[in-house]
Image (cartoon, rainbow, N blue to C red):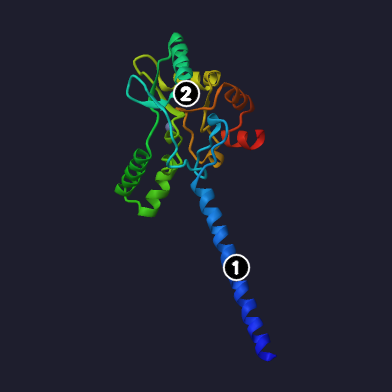
């Protein structure tokens, strides 16, 4: 009888250990997947890519090359072109200085930024932390999505302030939003970038502009 009870206990303990182990494995697996990949929504214009939503490495995109060699998602080309044409008609001459970036290019950018901080005397850990304030961790940059553009002025015609003001006032009409507004770093994870515009489509851009929300907040409250 005692023997049976002992065997029963051993089985119970073993079973408990098994359940706990499987539970821990499931939790770890879910966590890893959550950090690793973004769920692609039905609407491609609203894909969220940020420091907690990485783009799948196999994300496929059809690109259009601009006259200066920069590339963007083909689906945003006509709206971008229309925005630039209208800006030019008002004496503002925008230039896309950065569009689509491959995963490898993003990795290269990050390592160069870290190296530059290390060269200034920061430790590896400090350099990585500082670099991440300016460069998105590979897989988490909107430039890898092809829906973001960094816009500078053609300095022969206008300065930064004029262009940024024009974009802040008008870009939404063409489906673009100021993606990293001043004072919203705690939500977007990125410092103010008056040159970085993200395509979300005209309706969404209109709502975001009017509400003053970031893309993160808009997705959370509207869907
Ligand atoms: Zn950018």
10 Å crowding of disc 1: few (<14), some (14-19), many (20+): few
The image quadrant of residue 133 is top left
Q: Residue furthest right?
A: 1
Q: Residues within 10 Å of mark 2 (few under 14, many from 20)?
A: some
Q: Quadrant of the N terminus?
A: bottom right
Residue found farthest to the left: 119
Helix, strand or loop at mark 2: helix
Q: Are the two marked residues, 2 and 1, in contact with CB atoms closer than 8 angstroms?
A: no
- Kindly identify the residue that appears in the image at 52 percent across and 42 percent down: 38
Q: CA distance from mark 2 to mark 1?
A: 48 Å
Please name the residue that numbered disc 2 is placed on: 75
Element type where label 1 sits in the image:
helix
Residue 132 percent coordinates (x, y) = 43, 44
Q: Is residue 205 above or below residue 109?
A: above
Q: Which mark is residue 20?
A: 1
Q: Position of residue 85 (x, y in %)?
A: 44, 12
Query: Which image quarter holds the C terminus?
Result: top right
Point out residue 115 in the picture as x, y percentages from the top left corner. 31, 46
Q: Position of residue 104 (x, y in %)?
A: 34, 41
In which quadrant of this rendering is ligand 1 seen?
A: top left
Q: Please tell me which residue is depicted at 60% across the width and 27% down the height of the picture.
A: 208
Q: Residue at x 59, y 72 (%)?
A: 17
């Amino acid at each position: 009888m005692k023997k049976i009870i002992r065997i029963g206990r051993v089985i119970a303990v073993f079973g408990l250990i098994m359940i706990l182990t499987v539970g821990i494995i499931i939790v770890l697996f879910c966590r890893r997947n959550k950090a690793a990949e973004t769920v692609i929504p039905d609407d491609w214009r609203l894909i969220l890519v940020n420091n907690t939503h990485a783009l799948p490495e196999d994300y496929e995109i059809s690109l259009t090359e601009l006259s200066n060699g920069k590339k963007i998602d083909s689906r945003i080309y006509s709206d971008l072109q229309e925005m630039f044409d209208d800006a030019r008609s008002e004496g503002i001459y925008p230039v896309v200085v950065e569009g689509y970036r491959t995963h490898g290019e993003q990795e290269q950018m990050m390592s160069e930024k870290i190296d530059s901080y290390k060269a200034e005397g920061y430790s590896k850990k400090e350099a990585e932390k500082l670099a991440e304030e300016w460069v998105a961790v590979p897989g988490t940059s909107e430039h890898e999505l092809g829906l973001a553009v960094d816009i500078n002025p053609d300095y022969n015609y206008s300065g930064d302030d004029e262009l940024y003001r024009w974009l802040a006032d008008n870009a939404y009409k063409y489906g673009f939003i100021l993606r990293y507004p001043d004072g919203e770093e705690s939500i977007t994870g990125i410092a103010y970038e008056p040159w970085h515009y993200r395509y979300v489509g005209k309706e969404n851009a209109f709502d975001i502009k009017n509400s003053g929300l970031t893309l993160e907040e808009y997705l959370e409250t509207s869907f």
